[in-house]
Amino acid sequence: MVDVLARFAGGAQGVLASGLKEDSVGFMTAHSTQEAAQGAGRQAPRSRRFGVVIVGGAIMGAAAAYFLREEGYEGSIAVVERDTGFAHAATALSAAGIRQQFSLAENIRLSKASLEFYRGFEARFGVSAGLHEQGYLLLAPPSGLAVLQANHAIQRAEGCDIVLEGPGALTARHPWLSADGIAAGATGLSGEGWFDPWSVLGALRGANRTRNVTEISGEVVAVSVLHNRIDAVTLADGAILSCESLLIAAGPNSGRVAAMAGVDLPVEPRKRSVFRFRCPEPPQAVPLTVDITGVWVRPEGDGFICGWSPPSTQDGPADPGDFEPDHALFEEVIWPALAERVPAFERLRLAGMWVGHYDYNAFDQNAVIGPHPALDNLHFLTGFSGHGVQQAPAAGRAAAEHIVHGRFRTLDCAPFGFARLARGEPFAERNVI
Ligand SMILES: Cc1cc2nc3c(=O)[nH]c(=O)nc-3n(C[C@H](O)[C@H](O)[C@H](O)COP(=O)(O)OP(=O)(O)OC[C@H]3O[C@@H](n4cnc5c(N)ncnc54)[C@H](O)[C@@H]3O)c2cc1C
């Protein structure tokens, strides 16, 4: 993880030719934008007005800002980010998988639309999204066979290129796999794999800067509501940004930001440790494989990364400041499962580890996209529960569409709306990895 974290490290501030103060990763302070507006040396006012204020500048916030401009929004946009090196952002710490193996057609559609965006990324931005379409392999024990079959039927109906096979065909297709205890497995033949969210974030931010999107370094610490509308946010340094619309794209911290507006949003951090390892005789052409134990593994560079999705009984909200990897988890849960499923992994060598936090929707493990039903200038783009980086383009577009046009246009994201939370009707995704 050292190398991963090193590329996200922030740095000292500089002064641009324009006179704006910019840190080493491109963000301005709220006061520097005010000073620039007024002329250096004068007393800066404590407030500034924007059309749209976005809380959170990682992949969701950046994608939303990008698509606001794509949708023709001409008002001012501010993206507020407290961690300008993104050292703790889920975007930077993600396993970066993209799949179509969901239980809900709506999630398949979000990921498919985003896949097309990532496939065309280099033509659009001039840099690659690092897409490796090496597939997913989801395994099921006998007790999970009916669910895998039901999900596969939904995926096939959505046109996904996924094959469902029994143990014999599976080990013929994946000779490195042990099929002990497996009833069936679903392999994505195209349209699934992993990519590089860091490159995606960099390109989106670069495009946003050329389109007059203001990135502000600061932490939103209060949200004021006036006459049933969001009026402004207050930053930790005291600056006030008033807005016509507020978009919460604060990842695992989104529940806390919503609470500042008096809104109960069940999005919280869930700790996930990721381990990197090498193997003396590595198996070849391994897709992102999810074992019946919940342990997942995929190739990364000259080795592999792996982790574990705990059952809900062993999961719970994380301390937002806890980024200490769970060493025992690797020894006691992950490695034994890997060695049993892939015999070559018996001789693996641990090479690194890190922790990230899922933006976990404790209500139904699914995204919350679009406006609040009562505070109608408050919008959400969060709660992706482990499948956010892959859906950011399509979900960001959807959120932007609603802000600009008052409705979803490309994909109907109404089922992801906040209203379901208010009604207490889960829109549950069963394939949470
Ligand atoms: C270990 C791990 C593995 C994952 N694997 C996958 C995967 O394989 N595929 C997949 O699609 N997704 C995966 N995810 C999920 C995915 O990374 C997230 O869903 C996605 O990155 C969410 O993006 P975001 O921009 O909403 O959140 P983040 O990247 O967390 O960004 C939110 C930003 O908001 C900022 N912020 C928060 N509060 C405030 C505030 N008050 N003021 C100012 N700024 C604030 C934060 O500093 C942060 O930079 C994984 C996540 C983890 C942790």
Image: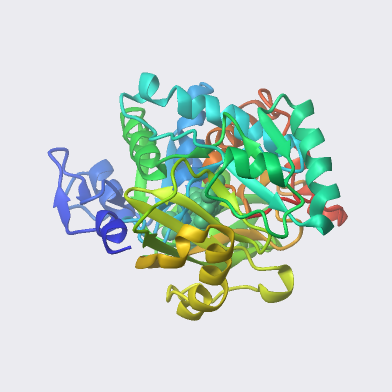
Q: Where is residue 125? Give x, y as percent.
A: 35, 25
**Picture quadrant of residue 396:** top right
Viewer-closest of 16 and 432 = 432
* Residue shown at the point (43%, 45%) measured from the top left: 79
Q: Where is residue 289? Give x, y as percent.
A: 57, 50
Question: Is 380 left or right of 353, judged from the image as shown?
Answer: right
Question: Is 70 left or right of 104, judged from the image as shown?
Answer: left
Viewer-closest of 49 and 262 = 262
Question: Is 417 left or right of 8, judged from the image as shown?
Answer: right
Viewer-closest of 309 and 393 = 309
Q: Is residue 250 visible?
A: no
Total numbered labels: 0
Q: Is residue 388 visible?
A: yes
* Residue shown at the point (52%, 62%) measured from the top left: 307
Task: Classify 113 as above or below 225.
Answer: above
Q: Where is residue 149? Give x, y as percent.
A: 82, 42
* Residue shown at the point (81%, 50%) measured from the top left: 145
Task: Classify 327 as above or below 64.
Answer: below
Viewer-closest of 180 and 353 = 180
- The quadrant of the image that shows the N terminus is bottom left
- The quadrant of the image that shows the C terminus is bottom right
Q: Where is residue 93? Give x, y as percent.
A: 43, 57
Q: How is the image coloured?
A: rainbow
**Picture quadrant of residue 6:** bottom left
